[in-house]
Amino acid sequence: MTWQQGRPRVCAHRGGAGLAPENTLAACRQALALGVRWLEVDVRYTADGVPVLLHDETVDRTTDGHGPVRQLRFAQVRQLDAGSWFGPAFRGERVPSLEEFFGLLADTPEAGAYVEVKEEGEEGNRLAQEVLELAGRGGLNHRVRLASFSPEPLQRARELHPRVVRVALQEPFDFTDPVRFVQDRKAQVWGPYHRAVTEERVRALHRRGVGVYAWTVNDPAEALHLRRLGLGGHPEDAVATDFPDRFLAAQEGRG
Ligand code: G3P
Ligand code: CA
């Protein structure tokens, strides 16, 4: 078996976190320029309620600032350098708003995105709603996959836009049976850590019309292993990687 046969989607995790500063437009543009068609980004609220692309609760690791993003206003977050920590070539890169990210997506008709809602509870509900409203305004709902570890955003997305594809992310140490996990959340895609994928699970989920989105796979040999377990047999099957270049090389430059 080769990677090309019935291959799952290749998705640039955090915009391709191994190649550029994660969750920035520079990373996303670079991944798209490489030929990647799917991007994964994380979304959180600033203090004044602006959805921005950021993985951690604080800005410390990925910018030159400090503190929880929920205590910083958007104008303050915009002052931060989100690129230098990764390398001098990215100096001055900003934390993007979700709106800016969707602007990039709107300008790239062949691209789609997994938007992971990092807020929980009532904030998660509100953010899921806002993600879908913003995506809808840009005519992007068919190109957006709404992902979350929390059940609330998935449920709100289902109530508002039942046809938007929802990815139920499962924590590595949550041993709930995946079929039950996905059914409880009424999601169309299961999103496990890649080591949780087994042939039996893939078969059981595919039989029920559920896709599998495995994260984060940085070794193409691991991805080929997933392929052997049946990943690629459903149109929503995907692997998220920090190094999309490695996968594109393995499949002759196509995402
Ligand atoms: O796409 C799911 C994956 O991104 C979850 O892990 O911590 O990188 O958001 P994390
Ligand atoms: Ca994520």
Image (tube, rainbow, N blue to C red):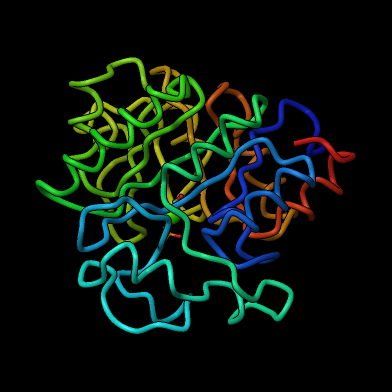
Could you tell whether 166 is left or right of 122 in the image?
right
- Which residue: 42% across, 56% down? 53
- The front one of 2 and 114 is 114
From what the image shows, is residue 97 above or below residue 102? below
Residue drawn 71% across and 41% down? 36
Give coordinates of residue 170: x percent, y percent. 33, 49
104, 191: nearer the viewer = 104
The answer to whether residue 206 of the structure is visible from this angle is: no
Closest to the observer, 124 or 254: 124
- Residue 127 lies left or right of residue 78; in this view the side is left
- Work out whether residue 212 or residue 31 is closer to the camera in this orientation and state it: 31
Most extreme residue toward the right, as rendered? 252
Q: Is residue 165 visible?
A: yes
Which residue is drawn at the image coordinates 24% and 43% (left, top)?
127
x and y, in percent, of residue 249 in the image? 86, 49
Locate residue 54, reporting x and y percent: 41, 61
Q: Which quadrant holds the N terminus?
A: top right
Q: Quadrant of residue 133?
A: top left
From this view, report whether residue 102 is shown above or below residue 172: above
The vertical placement of 73 against 222, above or below, is below
**Residue 29 location, x and y as percent?**
68, 49
Quadrant for the C terminus in the image: top right
Instruction: Give the number of marks.
Output: 0
Left or right: where does residue 129 sit relative to residue 255?
A: left
Residue drawn at the location 67% of the way across and 38% of the way down: 227
Query: Farthest residue in the left direction?
Result: 122
Ligand 1 rendered quadrant: bottom left
